[in-house]
Amino acid sequence: MKNKKPVVGILAGGQSAEHEVSLQSAKNVLDALDKARYEPVFIGIQKTGRWSMQQRGLAQFLHEDDPSRIALAPGGAPVTLAPGRGGRLFNLETGREEASLDVVFPILHGPFGEDGTVQGLLKLAGVPFVGAGVLGSAVGMDKAIAKQLLRAAGVPVAGWVELRADPSYKSAVEQARAVYKIYEEVFGLPFFVKPANMGSSVGVSKVHSKTEFVTALKQAFAFDQKVIIEDYIEGREIECAVLEWNNKVLASPPGEIRSRHEFYSYEAKYLDEKGAELLIPAALDQDTVRTVKSLARKTFSVLCCEGLARVDFFVRPDGGVLVNEINTMPGFTRISMYPKLWERSGVPYPRLISRLISRALERGDILS
């Protein structure tokens, strides 16, 4: 590897509802990657789960300027990573080696990508990769497990309960009608319903009534058979970016999200460029900034994360700080908070990508 540029596999798409977000992020990473330093190989994962590698110089995406329609370009060689072969990428039809990857950047969001599944495959293949490992990815993806671990470690989180799909009911609608009163009494109105294993606010609903709860639970169960019912927190939405660099866990100055929607929904995050105002840095007093940064690093450590993460907070009117959730592979779209926070901190997008790849390669050397 000393005599050639490291080959970076950019892995994107996937089978989750966040497929299009992943493609938006991958396009930005590919554009920003330092080609003088790294050689990119793009591997797209179709919604069916099929992996394909486009030949160099061919289009990678269709409708790349439309966040709601962006898609993988057709064609490409069907490929797979073989266990124990050190990142060698083989053509499933011919058996020929298509590429040998030195490191992988799995820009995947949600189940089958950010939940430890792909991370396990990459470990079996023997190739270093950007981001959290199997454990950190799995617990970071599952909101119920993450909250349990954070609460046990003394990290303040919003009140919540876990609810699973109950087969004794004929449908999610019947279950919702039967249990609504319990949650209205526990949480008051409004409250949130969220799939336990999903990101980017997919399947998340703010509930103001029994009718809305029926719709919300049906929608959440469409994405996961485990959901969380969570307190509505009146407060400012604050985000903090975490990055491992030079053997330190660094936390960026916090930024603030001011959503122009009912809440910071999927549409506000990725489809509506005017859906939210990003304030960087957030107008917080220094004590609150220190608290947010300290809790971001602690959350990163408690949940066994590596490389990078974005930690989301609520800051109450009384100054109290609560951790909302962690994102172990935050978005890298043109309106994503994670790269914007580091850019404001003096780490421009291309340098951030290089740092993440360098850290992954260092980790790989340590483990080999």
Image (cartoon, rainbow, N blue to C red):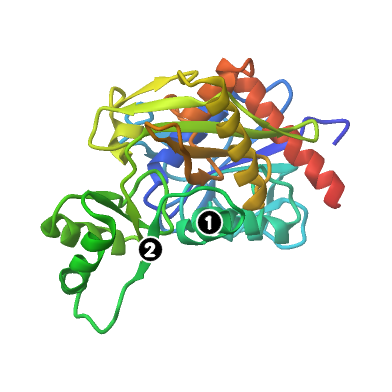
Q: Compared with residue 232, is residue 341 higher up or lower down, i.e. above or below?
A: above
Q: Is residue 344 left or right of residue 203?
A: right
What amino acid type is highlighted by mark number 2? Val
Q: Is residue 164 left or right of residue 344?
A: left
Q: Nearer the viewer, mark 2 or mark 1?
A: 2
In percent of width and height, residue 133 lies at 66, 53
Q: Which mark is residue 345?
A: none
Give, as a three-letter code, the residue at label 1. Answer: Ala
Res. 229 in view: yes
Residue at image position (22%, 71%) is 179
The circle drawn on residue 161 is 2
Q: Which residue is mark 1?
A: 146
List the single residue furthest toward the bottom.
168
SS under mark 2: strand
Q: Is 284 displayed left or right of 67 in the figure?
A: right
Residue that appears at 28% across and 56% down: 187
Real-space Cα separation, disc 2 to disc 1, in angstroms: 13 Å
When the figure is inspected, residue 109 is found, relative to residue 179, above or below; the finding is: above
In the rendered structure, which disc, 2 or 1, sits on the residue that comes first in sequence? 1
Task: Check disc 1: other Cα within 10 Å, few if <14, some if 14-19, many if 20+.
Answer: many
Among the 4 quarters of the image, the one containing residue 214: bottom left
Q: State the residue at coordinates (36%, 62%).
A: 227
